[in-house]
């Protein structure tokens, strides 16, 4: 009979918000009538684990020891959820009951859910957890093999197992081997539409280029069928790929929400929301602290279709994240923040019938109807939108007059301009920021805007082109235009152009 | 000065026969429809009339009968027409026909507008208001101080913007509308029920002289004709038809003003009503209009917006600039037009030599026909968007161009 420590200590972790908290798991077995209790503010998914453990032990050839089994999970004051504690609890019981050899003094990390057949399975949030654990020292790190992509993206090193029986080899056979996980990229690249499809819509093409080059929020208004949704797909194709250090940030949240089925890709995320979206869908669930669409769109695009049909409370809610580029949730007095740094792309009809911008006089909406339809997009909301472009459907006669080489792809040329602009912006502000999301309120010096240009812009503001708040947005857009022109200083011409993309008075 | 050409004689004759024979619009339409004559001026041709009676056309017997009557009384009618001509000559009154290029554009699209009308004063105002907008101002003959004040104030603002005020030269609101605008760039038009030489009401002689000098007085009735009671509703129609929208400053529940408003509404024009005290009986008709869906007249801006819109639609409808008539501008424009053609040719062949000012001239020229969006301007000028947007901002800044409904149009002021 080997010595039989009656307490075994292991480590695991759980995700809270965009970060993970390390937790200690202690298992104690003492003689008596068999009971099983889990303490430490655990939700029912953890407390239910007894059944899974009992069956998994049996399948893997272990036995559930007889006696009082108490599992304590700390920090005990924090609410914990998730079935990832199954594996550390099982290992703790096996160590405490002497069924597995616990190397003396070893610090062990484990996570994973158990199936009744003894298999070890991945749980959502693995990428967030492994990112935290990566920087801690452990002698043994055991994770489910199906968390390979998360581990690879998080830069985590350890051993993956498929089944509880493999623990025998690791501990009793002393075959623990720390390996680097490789992740595989999604093999089918997303299909982007080429910008040359927007023939004759010069303003929109230019707006998309500026938006992607400077990370500016953009709204496209036009009749049904003029290519608004297409423009959304084109925009995602113009953005550069994710940087290697951005991938864990983006993937970990997607993985937290979608589980293992989320795609591993360097393409920027595109989250599409519709008019039936609610505030909680955008914000996320504050009970379980799962991020919503805004946080999931971080580093990518939030595509809001049919914007004028949104409930005004949703649009009002959007104002703050658009300004601050973060979303906040409060649960039990603790503030959780998620980055929400995305390009907001809104599309919609300009009026009820949608024909307002069309050729001729097709729109039959009265002025009151038009004003009412767009009233939600007025004022404070539009001040946070840098670019507004009108679209109209292209008729056959337009096509004849537009000289474009047949279906020649233009997006690659646009993308190289965008990449150059991003590089310039990163040189200017550091690698995190672009013209659209640079957080400093005083941008004149940082963006190299000469005094005469500022004066010109305030002249325009005086004449009612845009409001005082729209003023800095125009200067930011002008800076991006100057970047596109490869110029060092912003010029009056750049501001002139930027002013054409603002809704009058905002 | 009155030009006594044959066509003008026929116009006077037409007015005379409409008042002194049993001929009416229906009969004339019948004659024109059956190709018996090309237009109303042929009624002055007695030889042709005799031909018609002989029966070579399949006309209604009633029509033939009326033509016979006309031949019988031809000399009497001619005599009256001569009398009209004499009065017109003495009082410096001219006649305009619907066949003339100078005929008001706003009347061209409406049915039942007079074939000939008479004017005295500065006809430029009527030419100009096609493209600068016109507003009818009507109201009670004994208005409250409040309505008078509002009339003075709002008409003055509209007039300063270049919008012409059309009214009926009656007491009260009409009088105030004319006086407050006669010296503004927009000018004023008085539409009389009787002949142009007939000052009605006689006590308004002071403003009659004023308008005759600086504005213009028009009437569908021939000179010398007394303003009969039954002519007033028809006069009100002309006021509504001539203008782009109608302001009702104050109207009792039974008032000719309400006729003008309903004519305007039937012609698809916006009606603005000055809100007033509900316990003031002299304003109940106007308030009733508000209840029926009239626009509330809060300030001059909403009227200006409405006029701008209707001018925009008018420009869309006009299509060809040749239909626009500027009496004094045509000569000046000619060289400018040739210049634009040369510029356009240059833009095709050698776009790099054109200056910003040249491009602006081209953009302005493109916008005279109808409002265009930025994309269309890119195509027309073959310039890239960033260049066009910069030019448009400059044009907007100096007030030449304005943006509405996603399209750019020339400002009318």
Image: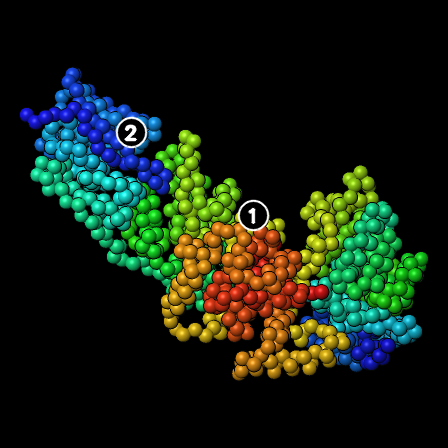
Q: Nearer the viewer, residue A424 or A136?
A: A136
- Number of other residues with Cα within 10 Å of mark 2, as a class: few under 14, some 14 to 19, many 20 or more: many
Q: Find residue B131 and report its image quarter.
A: bottom right
Could you tell me residue B116's position as x and y percent?
Answer: 79, 70
Above/below status of B234 relative to B39: above
Q: Which residue is mark 2?
A: A74
Number of numbered discs: 2
* Residue under the image location 41 percent in, 53 percent down: A432
Could you tell me residue A11's position as x and y percent?
Answer: 24, 34
* Residue under the image location 60 percent in, 52 percent down: A468
Q: Nearer the viewer, residue A140 or A59?
A: A140
Which chain is indicated by disc 2? Answer: A
The answer to whether residue A116 shows anywhere in this view is no
Q: Secondary structure at mark 1?
A: helix
**Residue found at the very far left of the displayed protein:** A1
Could you tell me residue B264's position as x and y percent?
Answer: 72, 56
The answer to whether residue A95 shows anywhere in this view is yes
Residue A380 — which label?
A: 1
**Residue found at the very far top of the displayed protein:** A33
* Residue under the image location 58 percent in, 55 percent down: A471
Above/below status of A173 relative to A503: above
Alpha-carbon distance for marks 2 and 1?
46 Å
Q: Is residue B138 left or right of residue A464?
A: right
Above/below status of A262 relative to A62: below
Q: Nearer the viewer, residue B18 or B4?
A: B4
Which quadrant: the N terminus of chain B? bottom right
**Could you tell which of marks 2 and 1 lies nearer the N-terminus?**
2
- Number of other residues with Cα within 10 Å of mark 1, as a class: few under 14, some 14 to 19, many 20 or more: some
* Residue under the image location 29 percent in, 36 percent down: A22
Q: Is residue B256 left or right of residue B83?
A: left
């Amino acid at each position: 009979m080997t010595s039989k420590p009656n307490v075994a200590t292991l480590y695991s972790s759980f995700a809270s918000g965009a970060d993970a908290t390390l937790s200690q798991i202690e298992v104690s077995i003492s003689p008596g009538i068999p009971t099983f209790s889990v303490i430490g503010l655990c939700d029912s998914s953890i407390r239910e684990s007894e059944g899974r453990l009992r069956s998994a032990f049996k399948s893997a050839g272990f036995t559930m020891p007889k006696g009082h089994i108490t599992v304590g999970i700390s920090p005990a004051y924090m609410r914990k959820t998730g079935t990832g504690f199954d594996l550390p609890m099982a290992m703790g019981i096996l160590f405490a009951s002497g069924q597995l050899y616990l190397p003396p003094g070893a610090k062990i990390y484990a996570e994973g859910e158990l199936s009744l057949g003894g298999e070890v399975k991945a749980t959502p949030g693995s990428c967030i957890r492994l990112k935290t654990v990566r920087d801690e020292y452990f002698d043994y790190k055991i994770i489910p093999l199906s968390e390979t992509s998360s581990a690879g993206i998080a830069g985590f090193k350890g051993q993956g197992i498929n089944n509880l029986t493999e623990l025998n080899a690791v501990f009793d056979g002393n075959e623990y081997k720390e390996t680097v996980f490789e992740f595989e990229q999604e093999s089918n690249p997303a299909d982007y539409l080429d910008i040359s499809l927007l023939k004759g819509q010069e303003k929109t093409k230019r707006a998309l280029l500026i938006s992607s080059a400077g990370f500016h929020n953009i709204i496209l208004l036009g009749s049904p069928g003029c290519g608004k949704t297409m423009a959304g797909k084109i925009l995602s194709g113009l953005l550069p790929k994710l940087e290697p250090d951005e991938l864990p940030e983006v993937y970990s949240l997607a993985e937290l929400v979608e589980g293992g089925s989320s795609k591993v890709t360097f393409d920027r995320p595109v989250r599409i929301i519709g008019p039936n979206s609610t505030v909680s869908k955008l914000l996320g669930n504050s009970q379980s602290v799962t991020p919503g669409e805004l946080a999931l769109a971080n580093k990518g695009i939030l595509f809001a279709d049919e914007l004028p049909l949104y409930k005004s409370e949703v649009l009002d809610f959007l104002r703050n994240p658009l300004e601050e580029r973060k979303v906040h949730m409060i649960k039990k007095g603790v503030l959780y923040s998620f980055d929400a740094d995305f390009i907001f792309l809104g599309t919609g009809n300009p009026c009820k019938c949608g024909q307002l911008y069309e050729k001729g006089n097709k729109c039959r909406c009265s002025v009151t109807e038009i004003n009412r339809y767009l009233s939600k997009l007025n004022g404070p909301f539009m001040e946070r939108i840098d670019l507004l472009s009108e679209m109209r459907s292209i008729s056959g006669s337009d096509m004849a007059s537009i000289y474009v080489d047949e279906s020649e792809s233009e997006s690659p040329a646009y993308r190289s301009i965008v990449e150059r602009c991003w590089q310039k912006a990163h040189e200017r502000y550091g690698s995190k920021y672009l013209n659209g999301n640079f957080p400093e309120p005083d941008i004149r010096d940082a963006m190299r805007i000469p005094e005469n240009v500022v004066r010109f812009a305030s002249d325009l503001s005086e004449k009612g082109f845009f409001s005082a708040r729209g003023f800095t947005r125009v200067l930011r857009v002008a800076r991006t235009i100057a970047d596109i022109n490869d110029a060092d200083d912003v010029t009056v011409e750049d501001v002139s152009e930027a002013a054409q993309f603002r809704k009058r008075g905002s | 000065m009155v030009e006594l050409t044959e066509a003008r004689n026929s116009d006077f004759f037409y007015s005379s026969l409409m008042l002194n024979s049993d001929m009416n619009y229906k009969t004339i339409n019948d004659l024109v429809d059956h190709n018996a004559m090309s237009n109303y001026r042929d009624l002055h041709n007695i030889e042709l009339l005799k031909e018609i009676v002989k029966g070579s056309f399949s006309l209604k017997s009633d029509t033939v009968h009326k033509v016979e009557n006309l031949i019988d009384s031809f000399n009497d009618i001619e005599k009256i027409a001569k009398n009209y001509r004499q009065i017109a000559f003495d009082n410096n009154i001219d006649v305009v026909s619907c066949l003339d290029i100078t005929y008001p554009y706003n009347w061209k699209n409406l049915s039942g507008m007079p074939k000939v009308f008479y004017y005295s004063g500065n006809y430029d105002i009527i030419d100009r208001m096609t493209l600068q907008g016109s507003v009818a101002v009507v109201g009670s003959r004994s208005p409250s101080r409040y309505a008078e004040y509002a009339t003075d104030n709002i008409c003055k603002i509209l007039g300063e913007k270049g919008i012409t005020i059309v009214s009926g030269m009656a007491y009260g609101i009409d009088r105030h509308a004319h006086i407050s605008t006669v010296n503004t760039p927009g000018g004023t038009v008085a539409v009389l029920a009787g002949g142009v030489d007939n000052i009605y009401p006689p006590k308004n002689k002071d403003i009659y002289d004023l308008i005759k000098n600086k504005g213009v007085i028009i009437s569908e009735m021939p000179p010398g004709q007394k303003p009969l009671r039954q002519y007033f509703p028809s006069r009100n129609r002309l006021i509504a038809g001539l203008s782009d929208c109608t302001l009702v400053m104050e109207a009792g529940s039974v008032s000719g003003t309400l006729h003008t408003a309903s004519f305007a509404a039937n012609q698809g024009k916006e009606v603005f009503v000055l809100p007033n005290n509900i316990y003031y009986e002299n304003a109940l008709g106007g308030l009733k209009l508000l209840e029926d869906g009239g626009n509330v007249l809060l300030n001059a801006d909403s009227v200006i917006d409405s006029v701008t819109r209707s001018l925009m639609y008018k420009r869309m409808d006009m299509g060809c600039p040749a239909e626009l008539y500027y009496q004094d501008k045509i000569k000046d424009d000619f060289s400018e037009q040739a210049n634009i053609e040369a510029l356009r040719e240059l833009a095709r062949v050698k776009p790099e030599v054109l200056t910003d000012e040249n491009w602006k001239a081209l953009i302005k020229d493109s916008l005279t026909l109808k409002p265009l969006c930025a994309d269309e301007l890119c195509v027309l000028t073959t310039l890239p968007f960033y260049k066009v947007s910069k030019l448009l901002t400059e044009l907007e800044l100096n007030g030449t161009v304005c943006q509405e409904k996603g399209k750019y149009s020339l400002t009318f002021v």
